[in-house]
Image: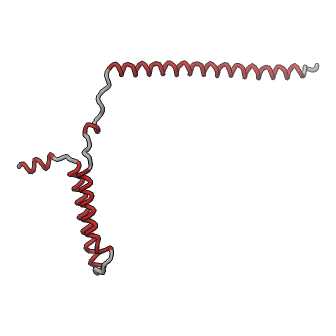
Amino acid sequence: MGYDDEERGSKDPRVIATGIVGGIACGMMALSIPLIAIAGGGGGVINALPVLAVAGAAFSSAAIWLSPKRNRDADELPPQLPLRELEDIKHGLMDIRSYVASLEERIEDQEIQLRITQAAAAKGISDKSQNDNPPQG
């Protein structure tokens, strides 16, 4: 009764990570033992595969359990900002919006002024070309 409750309630990530490391180590052992049998046990690195699998799992598990515990509060959202700070941010955004709107108006005014200037220049050129060649009659 108590054991099942503890097992279900355990959400420590170190337990989960150690279980994963153990499962992978078992898989490496399951692959390395037949490889030794196929190789004939002639020596070399292949004979050390099971020992390396166990050593790797042991070192990994030790690193998991000796690492500093993570603060669960750091994973959660930060507390809400005070109302005054939110109002300050809101006013700052409104100021930025009004500044951008005034810049857009200035750009539109300059574009209109440029079009007028270009139209006047084009008309002046066409008027000038007509004055240079008076109609012959």
The image position of residue 101, as x and y in percent, is 52, 20
Q: Nearer the viewer, residue 69 or 136?
A: 69
Q: Is residue 12 above or below residue 119?
A: below
Position of 92 with respect to 34 (left or right) is right
The image position of residue 93, as x and y in percent, is 44, 22
Q: Is residue 114 above or below residue 71?
A: above
Q: Quadrant of residue 37?
A: bottom left
The residue at 24%/65% (across/down) is 54
The residue at 24%/60% (across/down) is 58
The residue at 27%/71% (across/down) is 32
The image position of residue 62, as x and y in percent, is 24, 56
Q: Is residue 34 above or below residue 65?
A: below
The residue at 8%/51% (across/down) is 3
The image position of residue 106, as x and y in percent, is 59, 19
Rendered-image quadrant of the C terminus: top right
Q: Nearer the viewer, residue 113 or 43?
A: 43
Q: Outermost residue toward the right?
A: 137
Q: Quadrant of residue 127?
A: top right
Q: Is residue 130 above or below residue 41?
A: above
